[in-house]
Amino acid sequence: MERRAIAEAGGAALVSALMAIGGLWLVVGYIDWVLVVGLAAGVAIAAAANHRARTGHAEAVEAEAPEVTADNFEEYTPIAAGDGGTEGVDGESEDGQPAERDRA
């Protein structure tokens, strides 16, 4: 596991444990350590799984992305308004309403 994943999982577990301790102390008046440790362990596992899913998805997207170079970047760049995109139909439709492209 890399350092960032360890820091995320450890930090999430620590924060959840501290919140559980504070909540139990305020609401119940005593601390159930089994509940606190179980909650912290569950949060750490969830944070580690979340990190693994995010990085795995990023690696998959990076592997599937096309190679964009100075020669072919226009193929992958969306056309913005005023860039000579497709021409629309001006005017009104047959029933006197604004054209379809004018509707929000």
Image (cartoon, rainbow, N blue to C red):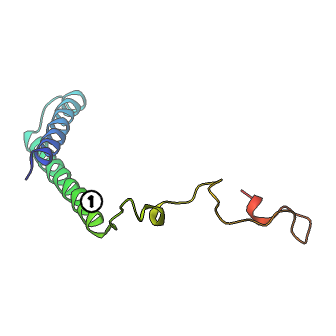
Residue, far front: 71
- Classify residue 29 as left or right of residue 2: right
Q: Residue 59, position in %: x, y? A: 23, 62
Q: Residue at x 19, y 50 (%)?
A: 47
- Of residues 45 and 92, the one drawn nearer to the viewer in this rendering: 92
- Of residues 24 and 104, the one drawn nearer to the viewer in this rendering: 104
- Classify residue 27 as left or right of residue 5: right
In the figure, residue 103 lies in which quadrant?
bottom right
Q: Which residue is mark 1?
A: 58
- Three-letter amino acid code at the position of disc 1: Ala
Which type of secondary structure does the marked residue at label 1 adopt?
Answer: helix
Residue 81 drawn above or below residue 20: below
- Of residues 101 and 87, the one drawn nearer to the viewer in this rendering: 87
Q: Residue at x 23, y 32 (%)?
A: 23
Residue 65 drawn above or below residue 3: below
Q: How many marks?
A: 1
Q: Residue 45, position in %: x, y? A: 14, 53
Residue 27 drawn above or below residue 59: above
Quadrant, the C terminus: bottom right
Q: Residue 7, position in %: x, y? A: 13, 41
Q: Residues within 10 Å of mark 1 (few under 14, many from 20)?
A: few
